[in-house]
Image (tube, helix red, strand yellow):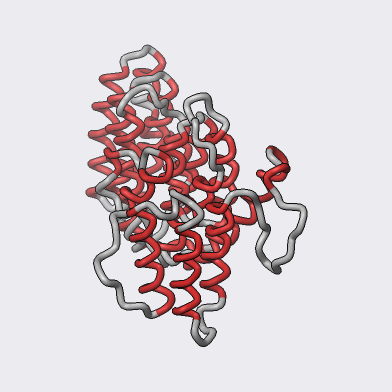
Amino acid sequence: MIDKYLSSIKPLLDSNDNYSAHQRVRTISTRLSKNGKSKESIELLFTVSKSLLEKSEWGSAIDCSILMLNQLSNLNDWDLSLVTQLISLTTNENSWRKKLIDNAITTSATSFKIPSGHPDVLDFIGNLYYKERSYPLAEYYLILASKKESAVTLAKLYIQWSQSPNQHHNDIGRYALRGVLAFILAEQVEAAITFTLNFLIQLQLTNSTIFLENQSLDGITLTHSHTLNFAQFIIASIQRSSTSNIAQEWKSLVSHFKNKSDIINSQPVAQACTEIGSLYFDIRPVNTGGNMMDIMSSLLGGGAPSNQSKLKLLNKNSAAELD
């Protein structure tokens, strides 16, 4: 379909005259778009962007990619692989990847009417950073995606992150609580459940001695970590949110665990518990809840990357609508 347009661009690419190829594709794509041939324009921009990325011509490649995204933003539905294929060809060694990712998320948010961006795109980005062991970035996008698949990956990520040389936390439960609070505060209960189950599975493979021999509670896997136990009790309480007197049970639960874990007794986590009480148990908060980034920072010493702070942390309907 686009062969006739590529005929004047391919020789430039083959001769490494990448600047001229970049300018030529811009001119042709603009003309195609104005003539109502957006599909051809998008395909052309994708093909040339891919070629330029493979040549590590980052500036020209990302410019063409963003032109493609701008045209995709006018469509209500499009093939997400057009974006993910291009992102996969970038590296984390410069700012070009971030520029492409930010634009891809914004475009998918506009096209699919999901404020935080399409969860499949976010999950792809999170997995990309996870494979590169860029744990803070991977965590951010996996939580933002809020898919069940993202929750599974996040559980693996936290176990691996906890084993990193620069991590000296002696309570593995803080990782579990970090994931649970992120999903629960975004009202993604199913993701929180999936995350917790997989976190426990991964923990069984790497640190089985943390589990108590006497497992006396249904639905709770008791461990030597009060923080990990509390993370599980949060979910169990929410699953019983329609039970009479659950509000008082929640208050008693929080009070009980505060005395057992300095992590749970920290101000940011206390604020998160207040927010949970308001969201799920109709408990009027005494004060406003804490910033999610403060909570994340208190648990692992670092929240979402600061350069991502303008993105909404989670859209509570995104994954549920598309799973």
Residue closest to the far bottom:
244
Q: Which quadrant of the view contains residue 116?
A: bottom left
Q: Position of residue 200 (x, y in %)?
A: 65, 50
Residues 217 and 194: in front is: 217
Residues 53 and 177: in front is: 177
Q: Residue at x 44, y 72 (%)?
A: 251
Q: Residue at x 66, y 44 (%)?
A: 203
Residue closest to the far top:
15
- Residue 121 seen in this snapshot: no
Marks counted in the figure total: 0
Residue 232's place in the image compared with 60, above or below, is below
Residue 27's place in the image compared with 33, above or below, is above
Which image quadrant: the C terminus? bottom right
Residue 292's place in the image compared with 322, above or below, is above
- Residue 70 seen in this snapshot: yes
Residue closest to the far right:
213
Residues 12 and 218: in front is: 218
Q: Residue at x 38, y 80 (%)?
A: 282
Which image quadrant: the N terminus? top left
Left or right: 262 in relation to 236 = left
Left or right: 109 in relation to 203 = left
Q: Position of residue 38 (x, y in %)?
A: 32, 49
Q: Position of residue 232 (x, y in %)?
A: 57, 60
Q: Residue at x 69, y 39 (%)?
A: 207
Q: Position of residue 29 (x, y in %)?
A: 28, 39
